[in-house]
Image (cartoon, rainbow, N blue to C red):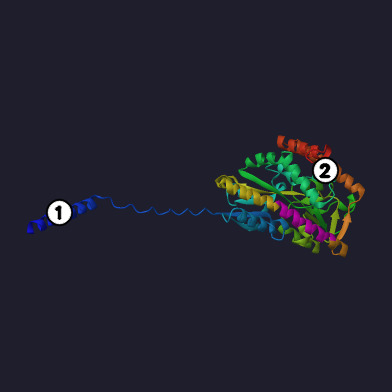
Amino acid sequence: MKGKWAIWFVFLALVIVSMTFVAACAKEATPSPTATPSPTPKVYKLKVQSAWPHGDLSMETLTEFAAAAEKRSNGRLKISVFGEPDIVPMFQVLEAVKKGTLDIGHAGGTLWGGVIPVAEIEFGIPYSFRVPWEKTYEAKQAAIRKFFYESGLIDLLREEYAKQGVYYLDIHTYGPVPIVVAKKPIRTMEDLKGVKIRDEGLWTEWHNMLGAAGTDISGSEAYMALKTGALDAAQWDVSCITGLKWHEVAPYWIRGEENDAAIGHMLVNMNVWNSLPEDLKEALAGAAEDYWYATVEAYGKEVKVIEDMAKRGEIVEVWLDEEAIAKHAEAAQEIWDELAARDAACAKAIQLIKEWQEEGKYR
């Protein structure tokens, strides 16, 4: 009996030893991999400054551009909005974008005509962006945007601005321009003679040709210049009345010079633009297009405001007479011809406008 138990004991011992050996040789179980968290998407913080001061309608409407960019980018584009002269003065905006002091500049090409000649035409030169074949304000704005994009003018502008190290993002409207306010009525060429008027770019040359004395000062200085008599008149867009309140010191609204729109732009530092992923480029471009429609709506409302002010006698509407308008048109044509001779880009832009105005193309 003892022998039988001894055999069982030896057998059990061997089984235990064998199991221990197998367990020791077995690989340890590999733990389940832990999921790597997705990297947090980069947030781009950008600065946009307008060349126009606080109180200017297009400058104040830039908050809608910033909001649209943030929404379209799911929070990855955060844009801080500034007015002139918060970071740089009006005439330094282009250079500030080029150098990277500003990521985005908001302005009108007439400020840079000495550097980019075609920019004068882009902004609108006397009697260029008139759309008599459309009857409503909204339709006129739509026709002008269609012209920029379908004629190829937008591509020409992007090529010219790229030479300055900036990307031409999109256009926006300032509504009818120039809105001229004056300290006295101006109806005739004699009335216009010697009038000291706040201008910019080629509009200064145009008024000088007509006998006025154009002077190029910033919008933020114009109210006091009108008040003190340093200026007799000033031109801007509709917000010179509704926002900047120039009519308080210059109550006459002079009619007959305006285009149906002046066109502004947003310019992006080229390095900033190239650094953005494609989806954020699309988001920024989409926000700029949203801003176009925001300015169309905003200026449409403000035009109605000043028309109502005129009906109530809060401003006095004064029309140039037929002789004065004819003289303005003659001087405008001289400016068109002079611009076309400046360089190839100007010649092409003037050609496109004439095809649009005279031949009905791009409509």
Q: CA distance from mark 2 to mark 1?
A: 116 Å
Marks 2,1: beta carbons within 8 A: no
User: What residue would you read off at disc 2?
Assistant: 332
Does dot 2 land on a helix, a strand or a loop?
Answer: helix
| Three-letter amino acid code of the residue under disc 1 | Phe
CA neighbours of label 1 inside 10 A, class few (<14), some (14 to 19), many (20+): few
Query: What secondary structure is the magenta-colored segment mainly?
Result: helix
Q: Is residue 81 magenta?
A: no
Q: Evaluate whether residue 333 shows in this view.
A: yes
| Three-letter amino acid code of the residue under disc 2 | Ala
Q: Is residue 196 above or below residue 120?
A: below
* Rendering quarter of residue 128: top right
CA neighbours of label 2 inside 10 A, class few (<14), some (14 to 19), many (20+): many
Residue 208 location (% of width, % of height): 81, 47
Q: Residue at x 87, y 58 (%)?
A: 317
Residue 6 location (% of width, % of height): 10, 57
Quadrant the N terminus occupies: bottom left
Q: Which residues are magenta?
A: 292-307
* Rendering quarter of residue 345: top right
Q: Is residue 256 left or right of residue 342?
A: right
Q: Which of the numbered marks, if any, corresponds to residue 11?
A: 1
Residue 48 location (% of width, % of height): 62, 54
- In this view of the protein, which residue sits in the foreground, 162 or 181? 162
